[in-house]
Amino acid sequence: MKDNIIPHDYQISKEDRQKAKNHNSFLLWFTGLSGSGKSTIANVVEQELFKQGINTYTLDGDNIRKGINNDLTFTPKDRTENIRRIAEVANLMVDAGIVTLAAFVSPYKKDRDNIKSIVKDVNFVEIYINTSVEECERRDVKGLYKKARAGEIKNMTGISAPYEAPENPDIEIKTEDVSVEQAVKQILDYIRPKLQLENE
Ligand SMILES: Nc1ncnc2c1ncn2[C@@H]1O[C@H](COP(=O)(O)OS(=O)(=O)O)[C@@H](OP(=O)(O)O)[C@H]1O
Ligand SMILES: Nc1ncnc2c1ncn2[C@@H]1O[C@H](COP(=O)(O)OP(=O)(O)O)[C@@H](O)[C@H]1O
């Protein structure tokens, strides 16, 4: 069946779209425990980029797990499928010339490696929001840790399901040591050269 799918040769390329917008596009992937600070930091990074006239879009649990992935749970198999679909969507967005931000727990190394192969290494910036489970549990932004401790939530990452920390992330942010503003600056400094088109 797949052999019969023959791609059409569309004439407007990713490079054409990037030139029209005057910046490169790539994926900023935030990984870390629930409550680590992924959404908080991604949100401010996006606001700063938006102010600079950069085309951006953020994928997170609200628009993905309630929409395209509303059939998926938190079993390892479903998490793998969750991340695969998000990576495919992100790949289309990067192809459309958009600096795409994605904030997902994404606890498994093999799933994060798969994102890299879908969007290609050069388009993938892995940002590890490194906050200890003790601190995430203390924050307990959504009350999920309390529920997990009470046995009301199964497979809770950090409590009853694993989190495989990135070994060599592009950016690592320890939110117990740095402020949101410092974290945002670290990310913006890292991506500034990546935004520039080659002939500039
Ligand atoms: N069992 C369990 N483990 C972890 N997280 C849980 C769980 N159940 C619900 N939630 C809430 O769902 C958000 C995580 O969804 P993700 O799509 O990012 O997870 S994953 O990447 O597929 O592992 C996560 O959102 P964030 O807090 O924004 O990380 C939680 O609020
Ligand atoms: N340095 C920091 N960076 C990011 N968030 C922080 C920091 N210090 C405290 N917080 C707080 O931690 C919480 C992180 O929640 P959230 O961004 O929703 O996490 P996640 O998206 O990873 O689940 C927020 O209430 C935020 O205000």
Image: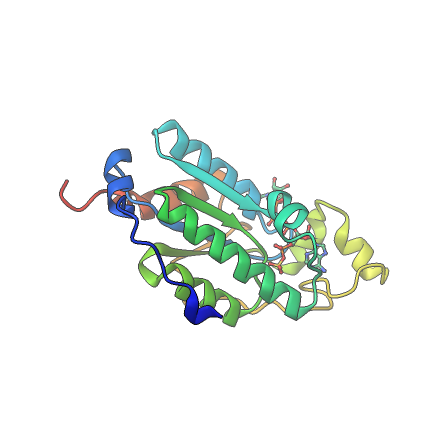
Which one is nearer the viewer's eye here, 147 or 15? Answer: 15
Q: Is residue 95 left or right of residue 36?
A: left
Q: Quadrant of residue 123?
A: bottom left
Which one is nearer the viewer's eye here, 176 or 36? Answer: 36
Q: Does residue 97 appear in this view?
A: yes
Its colouring scheme is rainbow
Q: Quadrant of residue 71?
A: bottom right
Q: Residue at x 40, y 66 (%)?
A: 117
Q: Position of residue 85 (x, y in %)?
A: 54, 58
Judge whether 113 appears above or below 98 on screen.
below
Q: Does residue 167 appear in this view?
A: no
Q: Position of residue 107 (x, y in %)?
A: 58, 64
Which one is nearer the viewer's eye here, 130 or 111? Answer: 111
Q: Residue at x 41, y 51 (%)?
A: 27
Q: Position of residue 91 (x, y in %)?
A: 42, 53
Image quarter for ligand 2: top right
Q: Position of residue 170 (x, y in %)?
A: 38, 59
Quarter placement of the C terminus: top left
